[in-house]
Amino acid sequence: MHRINRRDFLRYSGFAGFSLLTGGIGAILEGCTIHSTKTPKSFVTPLIVPDTAGPLALYKPDSETFKIEAGTAKLKIVNEKESLLNVYKIKHQEKTLINPTILVQKGQELRVTLENGLSEDTIIHWHGLMVEDKMDGHPAYAIKPGERYEYKFKVKNRGGTYWYHPHPENLTAKQAYKGLAGILLVEDEEELQLRQSLELELGKNDIPLVIQDKRFDQAGNILYNPDDMEKIMGFHGNKVLVNLTLNPLLKVAKKFYRFRILNGSNARIYCLSLHSEQRRDFIPIYLIGTDGGLLDKPYKINKFFISPGERADILVDFTSFNTGEELFFKSLAFDPMDNEDAENMDNMGMQHDSLKAGEEINILKIVINRETEKTFKIPQNLSSLKPINIKDSLTRKFRLSFTGKQWQINGQTFNISQFPVIVKKHSKEIWEIANDKKSMPHPMHLHGFMFQVLQRLNSPKQVQDLAIDQSGRTAMDLGWKDTVLIWPGETVRIAIDFTHDFTGDQVYLFHCHNLEHEDLGMMLNLKVKE
Ligand code: C2O
Ligand code: CU
Ligand code: CU
């Protein structure tokens, strides 16, 4: 179990936000707890939701090729100032869709032309989609400014919340931070059934929430200037946006709402929960899906960790609240376990005006503002999930460690022409990923395949507290995953089925989704051999 020692105390107390932590040091020990029930008045900006144009606009591609441009756009985010962002743009019926929410059917064939309107190399990676390597956005396929890349692939994934973002070597963190990221929703039968049974409507009561922390300069532009220490720790912003909205407010009716949450931050981990100032208590959250779509049934939880790259599909029942009642999505204070034992980690992040890792943050204000006539029951069966048959499977071990300069996987960093992990197509493997004690949390992500989390071992107390079964798994570990958070000292075992029907060897990636870590080389090629 993790304990706060004197050094940590000094470190924490040096943080600007320490006075907010009214519970003091004892409360930090708890991990993932609420300290301040006071909520700010500043949350008045209407939350941007998918509409017909603008940020996150809904786009349903047909069978034709559509063009997506990586370019720039100006958006008013901070104090009416125009922020220059890097964004994905689709022109559709005279309108410009920015970082569109792309809605596709399972089985649909997608044809996309990426046009690089940036001043540096880029490539799109479809995070979570099982596509052949040429379509996966491996940095080897990055294109130069002005060039185009043609994607053509079939969507084989289950219904669920996926996303797309850049993946050029050494430039992923910067480009994603400057705004390049969008949601891709896959629909299938089970997904539609759920939507029907609760009358969920995209953009109305079925809302993606893309949570991203960013830093802005005086002019309102996004600042991405990590120093050496921030490259090692990951770059944290000083403002948290939801759907590119600062201090967002959402007015809801008294019914079920679905939120499809993506942690699209470069490095920040959130411990999300929902609170009412009046009730001074957690409001139940029903976790119904994770990275790769729906779970078998809803899981009622109070709070959950979500790390960069992960998705959480949740339902909240607002029926029993009073009109006028105010709720807050918060990230609770927790121990970020940022390598506190490593000597050279002292003073990390203290020189900057940023929200510290693990600090309590208000994310989204929700106001109940209208009645509804109909009432609904939450369905008890959502899907059926088949465990991967791991009988006689090989166990492959990975160790996450720090050299004093950079993060490594099995003592290695990324080399685009080396293939340190070679697996056999159609084989099933168990991966045992162990994070050093002198480390920090790493959200480990696999391209090309979804996996299942089998077990968590030696978890810190704040993770053990969230365990829902004997294997130490939390609700967020259930279902099909492509990203799993591994805490210092912890070992996580996952099962992967390397079955696919692409011909020829395929090259994917296994990497940390702390994007500064990825760019520093905490990434390995994975070759799937015929
Ligand atoms: Cu979302 Cu290789 O990453
Ligand atoms: Cu990915
Ligand atoms: Cu990492």
Image (cartoon, helix red, strand yellow):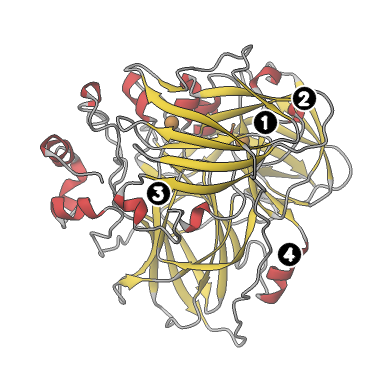
Place residue 349 in its image quadrant. Answer: top left
Question: Spatial distance from mark 1 to mark 3, Cα to Cα?
Answer: 25 Å
Q: Residues within 10 Å of mark 1 (few under 14, many from 20)?
A: many
Q: Residues within 10 Å of mark 2 (few under 14, many from 20)?
A: many
Residue bearing the label numbered 2? 149
Label located before the other in sequence (2 or 1): 1
Q: Which of marks 3 and 4 is in front?
A: 4
Does dot 4 land on a helix, a strand or a loop?
A: helix
Question: Spatial distance from mark 2 to mark 1, Cα to Cα?
Answer: 9 Å
Locate residue 346, reporting x and y percent.
Answer: 20, 26
67, 307: nearer the viewer: 307
Does dot 2 land on a helix, a strand or a loop?
A: strand
Question: Spatial distance from mark 2 to mark 3, Cα to Cα?
Answer: 34 Å
Q: Which residue lies furthest to the bottom in this view?
A: 373
Question: Spatial distance from mark 3 to mark 4, Cα to Cα?
Answer: 29 Å
Does dot 3 land on a helix, a strand or a loop?
A: strand
Locate residue 497, reporting x and y percent.
Answer: 68, 41
Q: In this view, does 174 lie above or below 273?
A: above
Residue bearing the label numbered 3? 270
Q: Residues within 10 Å of mark 4 (few under 14, many from 20)?
A: some
Residue bearing the label numbered 4? 190
Residue 124, label in figure: 1
Q: Which amino acid does label 4 sit on?
A: Glu
Q: How many marks?
A: 4
Label located before the other in sequence (1 or 4): 1
Q: Quadrant of ligand 1?
A: top right
Q: Which residue sits at x=29%, y=63%?
A: 39
Is residue 73 in view from this perspective?
A: no
391, 205: nearer the viewer: 391
Question: Spatial distance from mark 2 to mark 4, Cα to Cα?
Answer: 33 Å
Is residue 330 in view from this perspective?
A: yes
